[in-house]
Image (cartoon, rainbow, N blue to C red):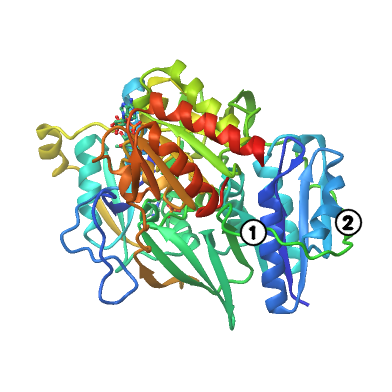
Amino acid sequence: MPTVFAYAETRGGELRRVALEAVTAARTLADALGGDVEAMLVGAPGIAQYAEQLGAYGADVVVTVEDVAFARYNPEATAAVAAERIGSKGDRAAIFSASAQGRDLAPRVAAKLRVPLAADVTAFELQGDAIIVTHPTYTGKVIATASLTANPAVLSIRPKSITPVEHARSPRVESIAPVGDPSASRVVVQEVIEGNTAALDLGEAPVIVSGGRGLKAPENFAMVEELAAAFGNAAVGATRAVTDEGWRPHTDQIGQTGRLVSPDLYVAVGISGAIQHLAGMRTSKTIVAINKDREAPIFKIADYGIVGDAFEIVPALTAAVREVRKGG
Amino acid sequence: MKIAVCIKRAPDMEQRFKIAADGASVDATGLKFDISDFDAYAVEKALKITEAQGSGEVVVLSLGPDIVQETLRKALSLGATRAVQLKTDSVPFDSFAIAEALAAALRDGGYDLILFGKIALDSSNGAVGAMTAELLGTPYVTAVSQLDIADGTATARRELEGAAEIVAFPLPAVVSIDEGPWRPRLASLKGIMGAKRKPLEVKPAELAQPRYTVQTMQLPAERTGGRIIGEGADAVPELVRLLQTEAKVL
Ligand SMILES: Cc1cc2nc3c(=O)[nH]c(=O)nc-3n(C[C@H](O)[C@H](O)[C@H](O)COP(=O)(O)OP(=O)(O)OC[C@H]3O[C@@H](n4cnc5c(N)ncnc54)[C@H](O)[C@@H]3O)c2cc1C
Ligand SMILES: Nc1ncnc2c1ncn2[C@@H]1O[C@H](COP(=O)(O)O)[C@@H](O)[C@H]1O
């Protein structure tokens, strides 16, 4: 029976939403092939606790690889154990997320298996012996469909392009050993510089409130943070103009050279809408723009635009959102 | 120190794209091409390293048809020492096929450091660097925004989601370059003149049959945006109403 592998991404010992997306994608493909889903959890001891949850989303088998050396994402050892498992089981396909971790991991695994990667896929379909994928290219300005005929077929799925769906099963859980010594990585982490870890991750937040140079000074981001807090499920992003000034950390930058995001709602405050910024957020479901310049390019792609001074509009919006959320 | 930089020719992304008559590629007519963004950052970083060391060599490689010689000459005009074209009629979409061809050309080159862009802006695969490193069996670090070399060891900052890591690794190594604090320089007239005399070697690319091929290309549906609902704080109630009833996000 053909098996579809899904890498169930975790971070800091927590299962990530993209893991459920990967398992859901693998389930869809396995059903089309008449096969099984095998999900892999890699982490510090205790990570196996998520096996049941992966079963709820369609994993028939959950393979767990537990070692203290996996407490942080460990590229070399993770790629080694994933490729070894996919290769030795003769899996038909392997699904990763195109998250930051997956963008690092998936091409390593594909190369070990000597196959190409269908990267950053937003949709896929089985057609005979090929998998036809949709892949945004040219910074999202051109959408390609491509045919992947390699075996195994390795895909990375753009976060949030698939909605996790439950397919309850009680998975068989199998614990396996790492390949080689997982602490023997040639690349040694010397220091970790945490960004705003307390906040929701930009890749996963349903709502993003982003600020641009129009906010004029770093302390004015308090206004943006208050709006984000009013939504309750929002993360704060920024433009390069802002991260270059050092008003916000580089890790908050959205755009061609920053994070690619597609939240349900993107609120752009004091952002002009440069092409490099749009490249990172144009696939958001709903876009709101607040800008004092009626001609700002951001209004061309905004579903709802308000022309005017952010210092007047944002506090009013924050109050109104609070009111709605209190009432609901 | 001997540094290789793999550079791809790509159109400037600010332009308007049209789909070619074959329905599976971008119409190149009238488009301006250059070194793909992150690859230009990689060239700049390589030049900075050899300049700081006062010695060394920066070799630029590009796989593609003869037109990529333009891209290679551009890198030579910026200061690269020599160039290699891996000649093929067209550039495949298959990241592994490209990585194999690049790895074959790099393997016995004696490079201490091999730089890639974190992603090529046209194909947007973000895969060739990692794959080449796997094929060469060297350490690899993705999306690096700071890179320092001292005594055969490299230190780099790589951006993860919501955090950054400082990592150390031995050379030879492969690194993919994210945007960093360094900005690509402009070519000087002297650089442009000098580039004409620098060596540009042409070798056939050792490309396998691609197993990942483009079937169609399309422009995305235009966002049906462009709707200004009002001015100033007075428009807030209407915005909230639309977010609740139309967009259903509140
Ligand atoms: C190679 C390259 C890569 C790049 N990558 C990125 C990237 O990844 N992400 C990114 O964001 N940028 C990127 N950029 C930079 C990009 O081109 C723009 O310079 C940047 O996005 C502009 O940021 P901004 O909108 O905050 O600032 P500005 O363009 O200066 O816009 C500020 C806006 O605020 C408005 N404003 C001012 N005051 C107020 C007020 N009181 N109320 C309301 N509105 C107000 C103004 O009307 C204006 O529209 C890149 C550039 C290059 C060349
Ligand atoms: N045809 C090519 N010639 C030279 N380098 C390339 C080529 N294609 C990709 N690369 C390198 O690989 C990186 C990643 O490309 P990609 O995986 O296609 O996004 C690019 O930024 C380049 O450094």
Category of crowding for the residue at label 2, using alpha-carbon neighbours closer than 10 angstroms: few (below 14), some (14–19), many (at least 20): few
Q: Amino acid at mark 1?
A: Thr
Quadrant of residue B161 within the rendered picture: top right
Establish whether labels 2 and 1 are both on one chain. yes
Residue A119 vertical position relative to residue B45 in the rendered view, above or below: below
Q: Residue at x 82, y 59 (%)?
A: A56
Q: Nearer the viewer, residue A214 or A55?
A: A214
Q: Nearer the viewer, residue A241 or A304?
A: A304
Identify the mark nearer the N-term, 2 or 1: 1
Label 2's element?
strand
Q: Residue at x 44, y 47 (%)?
A: A287
Q: Residue at x 59, y 30 (%)?
A: A229
Residue bearing the label numbered 2: A174
Q: Is residue A2 left or right of residue B136?
A: right
Q: Position of residue B112 (x, y in %)?
A: 46, 36
Pointer 1 chain? A
The residue at which mark 1 appears reads as A163
Quadrant, the N terminus of chain B: top left
Query: Given contact means CB atoms under 8 Å apart, are the residues at marks 2 and 1 in contact?
Result: no
Nearest to the eye among marks 2 and 1: give it: 1
Q: Position of residue A223 (x, y in %)?
A: 49, 23
- Disc 1, ligand 1: is the CB inside 8 Å? no
Give x and y (percent) for residue A300: 31, 49
| Number of callouts | 2
The answer for which chain carries disc 2 is A
Above or below residue B116? Residue A223 is: above
